[in-house]
Amino acid sequence: MEFNIYDLTSFTSSFDQLLMENLSPFWAVAIEMILIGVAILAFYAVVGLYLVYAERKVCAFMQCRVGPNRVGPYGFFQTIADLIKLLMKELIPIKNADKLLFNIAPYIVIIASFMAIAAIPFAKGLHAIDFNIGIFYIMAVSSLGVIGILIAGWSSNNKYSLIGAMRSGAQIVSYELSVGLSLITIVILSGSLQLSTIVEGQRDGWFLFTGHIPALIAFLVFLVAATAETNRGPFDLAEAESELTAGFHTEYSGIKFAFFFLAEYMNMFIVASIAVTMFLGGWMPFHVGGWEAFNNIMDYIPPFFWYAGKTAFIIWVMMWFKWTFPRLRIDQLLTLEWKYLLPINLVNIIIMAFVVLMGWHF
Amino acid sequence: MSIHELMFYLFSGMILLFSVLTVTSRRILRAATYLLFVLISTAGIYFMLNYQFLAAVQLTLYAGGIVVLIIFSILLTSHITHKFEPIGIKKMVFTIVAVAAGAILTITTVLNYGFNTVVASSQNPDMQLIGGSLLGYGRDGYALPFEVISVLLLAAIFGSIVIAKKEKSK
């Protein structure tokens, strides 16, 4: 079994062959499913934990503080300690709550983000499912998360939770339009919904650069709308701790609260991955069409590091948003979407279609 | 049993179970949640048939769109303590008779129909084909129905705005 860090296709396919030769197809598929599930679960947990750490460090940096610095070097194990604390904490049962829905809600939120992560291309060959409608699938499953939030808010039997859930519902339903339309702009340019084709199409330059003005507008709209869709500040009206205590998850404690918390960070990661895949070339190294020597040097960095680096950058930008802008009011939030982003997006799609039709893109 | 059969029975079982729970639950939001599970399991069956586009449409429109709308309206109108009254014995008997009659009719029809085993074409209708025929006006084109439906939707939106508009105070 050869292992080539630049192209994992041979590694995964030879592993698949090994299983298929030695086991019946049923067990081979079952083992592959379990392995991928465990791998994604582990990845999910580790990334979630370290995004929380990163957020605290970035927040501290923005506010001229040090941030967590006691547990381990540079506070590196702080979030692990937090996790252990959350696991040990008591789960407080609520009187007069709808217990079944109250318990299901965190799982709906976390499963929605878990399903989306399966279709994300991490590196060449490191891609669990490559649907031919890849980006549409990610949009579809990530839209299920809001149901969990709505159910959580209602079943808590708490007015703050209900208001938080209503706000979050209105926000996600409206910003989903902008996210979808800005991605469609890029789909027009790439001519495909399949994520591997989209990444492959950016071999000679990322879509952000090859689609020039309309792609740039779509990227900015996507960043704003995606930040809103993940319920992060400055759009965190669903939590709004100064007015609604903690919004839809006020009544949750212990590990169930941790699920919401983790899902929020993983949604940010998924959104950043989509942005990277659609606009910044996914795992594709930075290439400039025609510059052979430069492209060869760039190829020395393995694809996974390109992907991780770009995703980290987008996540950093989203954290920067959160700690710089003040929270919007609900009417300002809806005005921004329906009166500004949506019309801009619709016009932008027409411009992009025109650019592609005339062959003005690179 | 192949993994395909296993998944098929899993999804079908979920659809059956949650469909029954949807109509028998006495709490309205629970019913909506069970409906969500039914719709998601249906999407699972579409994925199994390798028809990914329809599966994603099922997830976005039904699970992500219509169920969210239903839950939203429940959140606005209903209180958590509200429970539907258990239905009377007379109604229950009639319902059971009607459901049994429907079930027998459907099952006998399905069993008597001679299904031809077709080797499933693994060809997955790709997006360009779907997009092309949706906006095509030649053979296999659906441009006219597409436009007519969009006019219908526009009319529906106007209608809802007119209904929702507040009357001017005299």
Image (spheres, coloured by chain):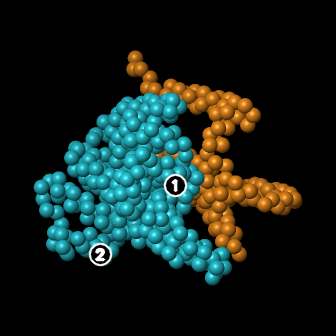
Chain colours: A cyan, B orange
Q: Looking at this view, is B159 or B39 the one in front?
A: B39
Viewer can see residue A93 = no
The N terminus of chain B is located in which quarter?
Answer: bottom right
Q: Is residue A48 visible?
A: yes
Amino acid identity at mark 2: Ile
The residue where tag 2 is placed is: A84
Q: Chain of mark 2?
A: A
- Residue lying at the far bottom of the rendered structure: A22
In this rendering, the answer to whether B127 lies above or below A141 is above
Q: Which amino acid lies under the numbered mark 1 shown in the image of this protein?
A: Ser
| Few, some or many residues within 10 Å of mark 1 (<14, 14–19, 20+) | many
User: Of helix, strand and loop, which one carries label 1?
Assistant: helix
The verdict on a common chain for dots 1 and 2 is: yes
Residue A316, how many percent across, how many down? 28, 54
Which of the two residues, B89 or A62, is positioned nearer the viewer here? Answer: A62
Q: Could you say where residue A189 lies in the image, as x and y percent from the top left?
A: 49, 40
Residue A288 spot, x, y in % from top left:
39, 47
Which image quarter: residue B34? Answer: bottom right
At 64% from the left edge and 79% from the top edge, which residue is drawn?
A21
Compare residues A65 and B106 and report the one nearer the observer: A65
* Mark 1 vs mark 2, CA separation in Å: 38 Å
Which class describes the residues within 10 Å of circle 2: few (<14), some (14-19), or many (20+)? Answer: few
x then y, percent, for residue A164: 34, 50
B97 horizontally vs A41: left or right? right
Question: Disc 1 designates what residue?
Answer: A196
The mark that comes first in sequence, 1 or 2, is 2
